Amino acid sequence: MNSPAPVLFVSHGAPTFALEPGQLGQALTSLGQRPHAARAVLVVSPHWQTRELAVTLSRQPETVHDFGGFPPAMYRLQYPVPDPLPFAGKAVQTLARAGLRVVGDEHRGLDHGAWVPLMHLLPAGADGMAPLPVFQVSLPVHYGPAEAWQLGRALSTLRDEGVLIVGSGSMTHNLREVQWGDAPPAPYVAEFTRWVEDAVARGDDDAVIAYRQRAPHATRAHPTEEHFLPLLVALGARRHGDAFISLAADTTHGVLSMATFGWGWPQV
C-alpha cells in the first residue's frame, strides 16, 4: 500500500507572512522539500466561513487578496495552481458518504489562509505555477471544536488518494492586542502555546477539543474560535502511528504565535 499524504496545521499569521518568512517560512520550505506522497492539497481556512459545508470546484481558482491596508506588493502576489477539480470532486463525494450535507462553489478562489503558507511550503516553479493542485473546504459558521474534529475524520480518507490536508489558522489570534513591529511575545501567548503543543504531542484530542475550559488564557488567546478550529480539523485527519513534528516558529507582533505541527511527514 502506498503511504498516505501527510497532515499539517500551520499558523499563517498576518498576510505579510507571504513576504516575511521568518523562522516558520524557512521551516515550511524545508518540510515541503522532503519526499512525500501528496498529489494535491486541501486547505481548511478561517477566512472561508459558510452557512453550509462547501468545497471549491473551480478549475482555475484565483488568488484572493482578502485583506486591506497592506503594502502594494501584497496585492501583486499570485499563486496559480494546476486544475484541482478531480480531487475536489472526490472530496465532495467523500463528505457526502460520511453523511455530511455539502455543496460545491464554482467561483470561490484561494483565500490568503491557503496561498500565503503554501507559497513557502510548496513554492511556485520557474513557470510561476504551484507544483500541486489546491482546493478548499469551508469552515461552517456553526462549527465548534468537536464538529471541526469530525470534519477532519471525514476528510482523512482522502490522504489515501494523495491529498495533503492542511488546517491553516493561528495558534493565537487576539487582534485587539496586536503590536505592529518588533514587540516581545506576551507571556500568556507562550503559556497557551505550550499547553496546546503538549496536549497535541500526547495525542490528547479530548483535551484540545475542550481547550476553552482547560487551556490557560484560552479566551484571551482566541476571543473567537475560527482561527483555532483548523487545528481540530488537522487532529481529526491524523492517524494512529503518524509521526508528529513541531516546526521551529516564532511569535509575531507580540501575540500571534506561529506554532505549526505536522503528522505523517517523512523523517529526516
Image (tube, grey):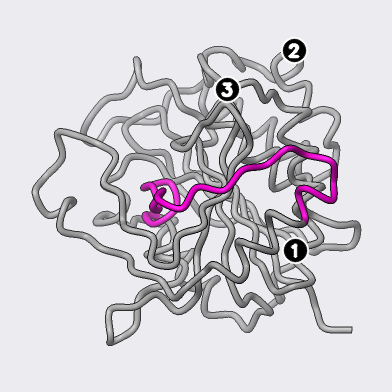
Q: Is 89 left or right of 114, judged from the image as shown?
A: right
Residue type at numbered disc 2: Gln
Residue at image point 84% right, 51% down: 97
N-terminal-most mark, 3 or 2 = 2
Which mark is nearer the camera, 3 or 2? Answer: 3
Q: Which residues are magenta?
A: 94-116
Pair 1/2: label in front: 1
Q: Which residue is mark 1?
A: 158
**Dots 3 and 2: beta carbons under 8 Å?**
no
Q: Position of residue 225 (x, y in %)?
A: 57, 22
In the rendered image, residue 233, in percent from the top left (x then y), is placed at 69, 42
**Mark sitting on residue 225:** 3
Which residue is disc 2 drawn over? 213
Residue at 56% x, 41% y: name it. Answer: 138
Q: Position of residue 238 (x, y in %)?
A: 79, 54
Q: Residues within 10 Å of mark 1 (few under 14, many from 20)?
A: many
Answer left or right for 110 relative to 266.
left
Residue at disc 3, secondary structure? loop
Q: Amino acid at mark 3?
A: Glu
Label located before the other in sequence (1 or 2): 1
Q: Nearer the viewer, residue 97 or 213?
A: 97
